[in-house]
Amino acid sequence: MNFSGSKQHIKPPQRGIFPLDHDSDCKQAMEEYLACLRNSHDMHHKCRDLSKEYLQCRMDNQLMAQENLDNLGFSEKQKVVGAQEYDNAKEREGYVAGKHISKSSEWWWQKSKKDWNQ
């Protein structure tokens, strides 16, 4: 909290704001991108080209500032290569995270006053 008498200054986002697409100019590109995400189990690198098309559509329709797509993560240098989907092999064998911890723990409100004074 700021208890000083001065006014707090809020800075806008670095890359500007993203107005809503009221006229549905980029709705088709958006729906194709979201469908791709759904079909690829949210592995965004598989939908890279659709994402690029969607952002380009937004820029072309003045729904966001013109920006070099390489600066938005679409350069060949930043391309995801060799990503593999996690196969859940440990979980299928019965692994449960945290099950190996045998010590019981207490929440902060369950600790005795003696522990607080130390």
Image (cartoon, grey):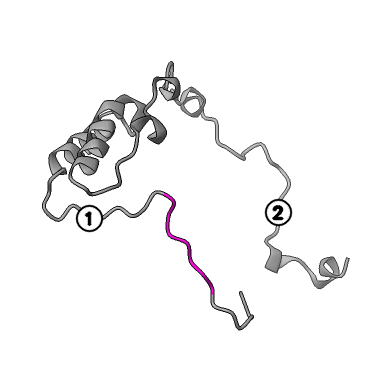
Name above or below for residue 69 compared with residue 113: above
Q: Is residue 97 visible?
A: yes
In this figure, which residue is indicated by the disc labeled 2?
Answer: 105
Density class for disc 1 (Cα within 10 Å; few <14, some 14-19, many ≥20) is few
Q: How many labels does the image show?
A: 2
Relative to 90, is 107 on the left or the right? right
Residue type at numbered disc 1: Leu
Q: Quadrant of the N terminus?
A: bottom right
Left or right: where 62 falls relative to 85:
left
Instruction: Indicate the quadrant containing the C terminus: top left, top right, bottom left or bottom right.
Output: bottom right
| Residue 79 in which image quadrant | top left
Gap between marks 1 and 2 measured at Cα: 47 Å
Give the extent of the magenta segment. 8-14
Image location (x, y in percent) of residue 40: 29, 28
13 with respect to 94 (left or right): left
The residue depicted at 59 percent of the width and 79 percent of the height is 6
Q: Do the residues labelled 1 and 2 touch (CB within 8 Å)?
A: no
Report if residue 43 is visible in the image: no
**Snapshot quadrant of residue 54:** top left
- Which residue is at a point 67% across and 61% down the rendered structure image? 107
Q: Which element is circle 1 on?
A: loop
Residue at (51% x, 29% y) in the render: 94
Instruction: Indicate whether 101 appears above or below 118.
Output: above
Tell me where residue 16 appears, x and y as whole percent: 36, 53
Q: Which amino acid does label 2 sit on?
A: Ser
Magenta span has 11?
yes
Residue pushed farthest right? 118
- Pointer 1 residue: 20
Question: Which numbered mark, 1 or 2, is in the foreground of this view?
Answer: 1
